[in-house]
Amino acid sequence: MNTEILFPNEVILETQYFKVSQDWEVPISGFFIIATKRKIRSVCDFTKQEASQFISILCEVRRGMQEKLKINDTYLFQNEDTKHGFHFWLFPRHDWMEPFGRKIQSVKEIMDYAKKIETIEPIIEHSKKTMNKENIIKNVKDNAQIMRQYLKDFSC
């Protein structure tokens, strides 16, 4: 299955061991991925330096999501059986997601909905103007820029 890469260059932070980016395929503002630069599967494979840097990055990115993007809740995920190597999701919860519920199963439904936003009737009461794909992509990119600016002086 081919997926559209919407955000190939929305890196918000890069360090010696990690790269933090907007999810490439899902147009959800603040959906960030922390990926290792070296090919590993699990947090068990972290060196002490990577472990220390990872927790610092996770805390600072999450703090920025809350302070700058006003994202109050996130779901945190990491699965070890992926072919893409270690990556850690910070999946934001936005108000528009409420009709999907708050169970883990809602995440896939939300992601599928976000990918089809232009082709189906919006689930919430937003005008077509604010829910079109062009405006959503611009919002995602704008918020990635806000986070890049927030993290520009980050060091660990």
Image (spheres, rainbow, N blue to C red):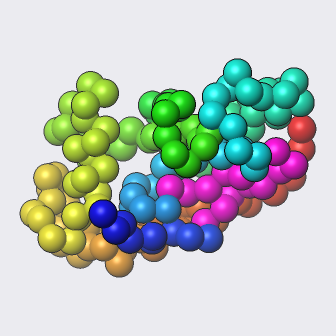
- Magenta highlight: main SS: strand
Is 68 drawn above or below residue 127 in the view shown? above
Residue 22 within the segment the image draws in magenta: yes
Q: Residue at x 49, y 62 (%)?
A: 24
Q: Quadrant of residue 49?
A: top right
Q: Quadrant of residue 145?
A: bottom right
Q: Residue at x 74, y 27 (%)?
A: 45
Position of residue 101 measured from the top left corner of the image (x, y, whole percent): 21, 31
Residue ranking furthest to the left? 121
Position of residue 66 measured from the top left corner of the image (x, y, whole percent): 57, 39
Q: Looking at the rendering, in which quadrant would you find the C terminus?
A: top right
Is residue 49 visible to us here? Answer: yes
Residue 115 within the segment the image draws in magenta: no
- 38 relative position to 131: left or right: right
Is 98 drawn above or below residue 69 in the view shown? above
Report the span colored magenta: 10-23
Is residue 64 visible to us here? Answer: no
